[in-house]
Image: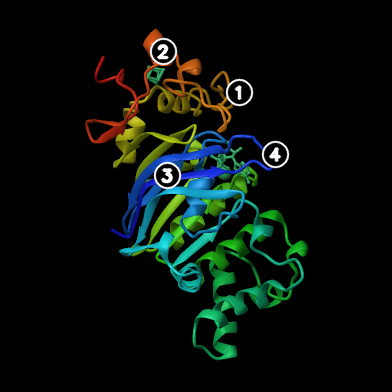
Amino acid sequence: MLLEVKNLSVEFLSDEPGQAPAHAVDSVSFSLNRGEVLGLVGESGCGKSATAMSIPRLLPSPPARITSGEIFFQGENLLSLPIERMREIRGTKIGVIFQDPMTSLSPLHRIGDQLIEVVRLHRNLSRSACRDLALEWLGRVGIPDPEQRAKAFPFELSGGMQQRVMIAMGLILEPELIIADEPTTALDVTIQAQILNLMRKLYRQNSALLLITHDMGVVYQMATKITVMYAGQVVESCEDAARFFAHPQHPYSRALLEALPSAETRGQKLRAIPGQVPYAGAFPPGCRFHDRCPQARPACSSAEQTLHPVNDSLVRCPFTETSK
Ligand SMILES: Nc1ncnc2c1ncn2[C@@H]1O[C@H](COP(=O)(O)OP(=O)(O)O)[C@@H](O)[C@H]1O
Ligand code: SF4
Ligand SMILES: [Mg+2]
């Protein structure tokens, strides 16, 4: 197993004295092997980024605090590693791609120099070999005329081109695990398709991709397995993405998929799920989805649900399609 996240819980301390912390992630578990793409999905505010950024230990602490869990990467628990070792792993074995390219690009340096620096820090190569590799990767992510463009500052590039440069930064050391948090959300549909194609093409057989998005269309194109989060918890996880899309079990998964445009509804306005994700500092008692769930019954607002197996999925609801 390349990555195994076990019972991870994360809270954010409030900066207001006396205020309860936000329980952003509640006992989340999943695993990922080489060759797999795990789609981690759920609406905004469900705890996807807090989960994902705990893996390379990139959550700012404070306010974030990991209150329980283990994260095994190639057998080592990342949460108990000395920070130096963690930095080395983060630099070479785990690549992170964010939604906003400016999170990982420096505005003050030319893009070519930034790529060269990444390689120079982690590979024992000559300056010219580092430069060749940087130019090669600019070409691979579809930047035309890499030699010239390498001299550009990030602000001189379009959003799509900046995103490509960031993807090159995340992949140039050929990490074994790639964590991409909403990598295409800020882009328009045409560029989004180009970037997804690019990630698919570059995606190596011996690496694994953790793809975080609230866009079911993106997961549909990319994922081999699925974990759905709602209000900080896993509500469904399925080892087989095709099966998940054919037979989603949890009412929340079904609602997310109904919001996905089909051939018939393409072009029409997307259906949104009525209501809102509850705030992580004040979850309602019982099933956290009950006030939005079309299948809710009276017991749902008092009984906490646990994950139980349904076919090859784990589902946090006793009233699934199959069990009805
Ligand atoms: N820096 C922070 N300080 C306080 N609360 C935060 C912070 N970051 C995230 N949260 C809270 O944690 C919950 C999960 O957030 P996040 O992981 O960003 O969700 P997602 O990525 O699914 O949109 C939300 O309720 C959010 O308000
Ligand atoms: S436990 Fe009840 S409210 Fe929660 S998802 Fe299942 S049916 Fe809906
Ligand atoms: Mg997020």
- Is the residue at mark 4 in contact range of ligand 1, meaning its CB lies under 8 Å from it? no
**As drawn, which residue projects farthest toward the front?**
18
Please report the residue visible at 31 percent of the width from the left and 27 percent of the height from the top: 247
Q: Disc 2 vs disc 4: which is toward the camera?
A: 4
Quadrant location of the C terminus? Answer: top left
Q: Earlier in the sequence, mark 3 or mark 1?
A: 3
Q: CA distance from mark 2 to mark 4?
A: 35 Å
Q: CA distance from mark 1 to mark 4?
A: 40 Å
Mark 1: secondary structure = loop
According to the image, label 2 marks what residue? 296
The amino acid at mark 1 is Lys
Q: CA distance from mark 2 to mark 3?
A: 26 Å
Is 93 in front, or is 270? 93
Q: Residues within 10 Å of mark 3 (few under 14, many from 20)?
A: many
The amino acid at mark 4 is Glu
**As drawn, which residue projects farthest toward the top?**
298
* Callouts 4 and 3 close, C-beta under 8 Å: no
Q: Disc 2 vs disc 3: which is toward the camera?
A: 2
- Is the residue at mark 2 in contact range of ligand 2, meaning its CB lies under 8 Å from it? yes
* Callouts 1 and 4 close, C-beta under 8 Å: no
Q: Disc 4 vs disc 3: which is toward the camera?
A: 4
Please report the residue visible at 65 percent of the width from the left and 74 percent of the height from the top: 114
According to the image, label 4 marks what residue? 16
**Ligand 3 lies in quarter:** top right
| Quarter of the rendering containing residue 243 | top left
According to the image, label 3 marks what residue? 39
According to the image, label 1 marks what residue? 269
Please report the residue visible at 48 percent of the width from the left and 36 percent of the height from the top: 232
Q: Residues within 10 Å of mark 2 (few under 14, many from 20)?
A: some
The amino acid at mark 3 is Gly
* Residue 258, horizontal then vertical, whole percent: 46, 23
